[in-house]
Image (spheres, rainbow, N blue to C red):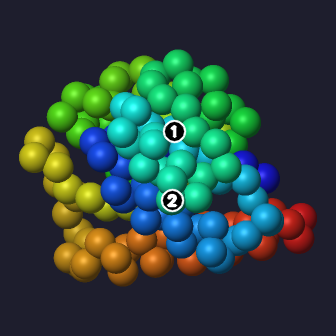
Amino acid sequence: MIIAVVDGMGGGLGAQLITQLAAQLGSRAEIIALGTNALATNNMVRAGAARGATGENAVTVSLPKAAIVTGPIGIVIANAMMGEITPQIAATVASCDAHKVLLPVNQTHFEVVGLESRPLGNVIKDAVARIAQLVREKEGS
């Protein structure tokens, strides 16, 4: 099973997700890093992704193969992350068949309301726990 982690900027959030996913899932899933820039991709690969690729085309080609996609909520919002999320990337992530586990990270031009404000580390732990549950469910089906 392929889990795609999509991130931009420096890839810090994606790297944290990958570190925890790799520790929890081991060889039960292949974690791939899809960065909007080379720095993000490199940091996610160094965090433990099996492989990584960069840019709009990499996201477009790789996501149809993923069972689960995760990253900050901005990956489904065109022009998020200071413009790194192109309309094509946002549409590809939003419309792919993979189950999406998105982290509620506010940006300067949008915010997510109705959620309690929590430390990012706790949100990442919750996302990893949910993804591990999805992997177990998919293994059992």
Mark 2 element type: loop
Residue 68 shows in this picture = no
Q: Residues within 10 Å of mark 2 (few under 14, many from 20)?
A: many
Crowd band around label 1 with a 10 angstrom C-alpha radius: few (<14), some (14–19), many (20+): many
Percent of width and height locating residue 57: 53, 19
Q: Position of residue 60 (x, y in %)?
A: 56, 24
* Amino acid carrying mark 2 in the image: Ala
Q: Nearer the viewer, residue 60 or 113?
A: 60
Residue at the disc numbered 1: 34
Task: Find residue 108 and name its label.
Answer: none
Look at the image and tell me in which quarter the C terminus lies: bottom right
**Marked residue nearer the N-terminal end (2 or 1):** 1
Residue at left offset 36%, top offset 58%: 13
Instruction: Give the alpha-carbon distance from disc 2 to disc 1, as whole Å.
Output: 13 Å
From this view, report whether residue 49 is shown above or below residue 125. Answer: above
**Residue 128 sits in which quadrant?**
bottom right
Q: Dot 1 lies on which element?
A: strand
Looking at the picture, which amino acid does disc 1 mark?
A: Leu
Front-most of 22 and 56?
Answer: 22
Determine which quarter of the picture holds residue 8.
top left
- Give the number of the mark in front: 2 or 1: 2
Residue ID for mark 2: 47
